[in-house]
Image: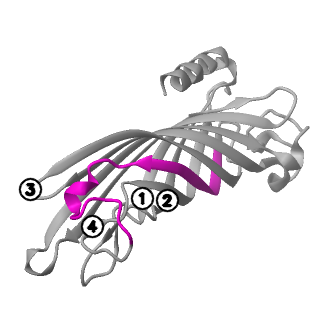
Amino acid sequence: MKYFATLTFAILLSTATFAQLGINATYRTNDARDWQYIGAGQPDQSLLPGSAFAIGLDYWIPMKAYRIDFVPEFNFSRMSNTIEIGNGAEIIQAALDNTWLSLFLNTNIYFLDLEGDCDCPTFSKSGGTFQKGFFFQLSPGVTWMDNQSKTSENESQSQHFAYSLGVGIGLDIGLSDILTLTPFAGFRYYLPTQWDGLDILSNPQPPVTPTRTDAVLNEESSVRQFYAGLRLGVRLDQR
């Protein structure tokens, strides 16, 4: 993580004359199939919330010859969830909190206008907005996950790095020579990662089979996310 942050900062400094900063907000749906609580006499419960919001800050670095843009992004998401655990009269509530800090190395490929004018945003371009502004995005990432679980009797905290790959599409809409609005959507897959300490929610200890009750299915899970959002870009070198 330190290597990626240092590399990104160095690139930002070396490309200051092309400065465009961006801020985005996304709505994300979560599917972590193995982070499940299997309870007696009640439906299975997801430990990770089914949906969440995230905020990102990015920096635009265009290539010279082709319309391929490198847009490294720092992203923040915080989620909370409450589930009921136990059996019969002994049911209690468990509080779950997740704080995720991510570095996404977004690469936007404007394949409909690959050899076109690179002087973004699209407001200053000739040609149609769709041709000039539509892009395909590849987005490898690394996320620092701080996952916490707490009951009235115990609490635990787990901190791990998780690696992911995202793919998506977007459309740059030039509002002026300074501002660009970009709706986008995509899918991100997180490789299996640990959420240690979930054994405080279960008896017997994980991993268990889906037929066992009152237990966490597994402390390790992949995460699948569908997301949609909106980005506002500001071109600082325009007057």
Dividing the picture into quadrants, the one containing residue 206 is bottom left
How far across and down, in percent of the image, does residue 116 sit?
Answer: 89, 39
Position of 108 with respect to 197 (left or right) is right
Q: CA distance from mark 2 to mark 3?
A: 32 Å
Magenta stretch: includes residue 194? yes
Task: Residue at 58% x, 53% y: name it.
Answer: 188
For marks 4 and 1 on the same chain, the one whose residue lies earlier in the sequence: 1
Q: Secondary structure at mark 1?
A: strand
Disc 4 packing (10 Å; few <14; some 14–19; many ≥20): many
For marks 3 and 1 on the same chain, the one whose residue lies earlier in the sequence: 1
Range covered by the magenta-colored residues: 180-209
Residue 52: mark in rendering: 1
User: Label 4 is placed on what type of residue?
Assistant: Ala
Residue 28: mark in rendering: 2
Disc 1 packing (10 Å; few <14; some 14–19; many ≥20): some
The answer to whether mark 1 and mark 2 are in CB contact below 8 A is yes
Dividing the picture into quadrants, the one containing residue 59 is top right
Q: Nearer the viewer, residue 179 or 70?
A: 70
Residue 201 position (above or below residue 65): below
Task: Residue at 46% x, 65% y: name it.
Answer: 33
Q: Secondary structure at mark 4?
A: strand
How many discs appear? 4
Protein image colouring:
one colour
Residue 235 position (above or below residue 83): above
Q: Closer to the camera: disc 3 or disc 4?
A: 4
The answer to whether mark 2 and mark 3 are in CB contact below 8 A is no
Dividing the picture into quadrants, the one containing residue 141 is top right
User: Label 3 is placed on what type of residue?
Assistant: Glu
User: Label 2 is placed on what type of residue?
Assistant: Arg
